[in-house]
Image (cartoon, rainbow, N blue to C red):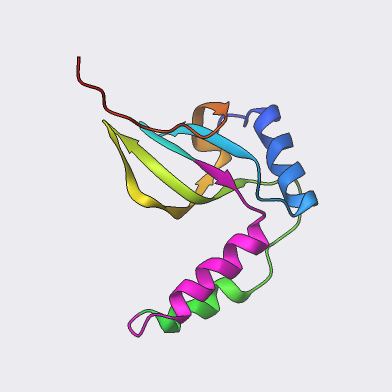
Amino acid sequence: MPKPDELIVDIAALVESGQSNQMSLTVVTGGAVITGRLAPEAVWRQRVSEVLADSARLADFAAVFDGPAKKDGPPTHLHFHVARILQGTVGIPETGGMYRIAIEDVSAWTVGDFSYSYSHR
């Protein structure tokens, strides 16, 4: 198992400790480019739980996300909100989604939230 990048672990730890959701990050994982803002795991879990609870078909799954995050050791995952998978000239979903990504699976990253645009030449 590869050792996760210490810088990205430190960024994740700072997001967790500060309860901030203002850090924008773009990562490459499994060939996908995901861009968005990081959220503390507890905030991310709460938001996912709220979305599921509002769904008639998925409400039963909300309780899975209500439990506390395990806090033993450094962060192992990045928790994105208002995130998009960049594909060609579009971001999917356009409005942003909630993604949880294992830090050890990140092969490249940069600070900032990439936007997408299409220009005719």
The reply, left or right, for residue 40 in relation to residue 29 is: right
Q: Residue at x 49, y 33 (%)?
A: 27
Vertically, is 97 above or below 4?
below
**Front residue of this view, candidates 80 and 60:** 80
Q: Residue at x 56, y 26 (%)?
A: 110
Q: Residue extending furthest right? A: 17
Tell me which corner region of the image, top left, top right, bottom left or bottom right, holds residue 6.
Answer: top right
**Front residue of this view, candidates 78 and 26:** 26
Q: Position of residue 37 (x, y in %)?
A: 57, 45
Q: Which stretch is magenta?
A: 36-57
The reply, left or right, for residue 16 in relation to residue 90 is: right
Q: Residue extending furthest top? A: 121
Q: Determine if the magenta segment contains residue 46.
A: yes
Q: Residue at x 79, y 50 (%)?
A: 18
Vertically, is 15 above or below 10?
below
Q: Residue at x 20, y 20 (%)?
A: 120
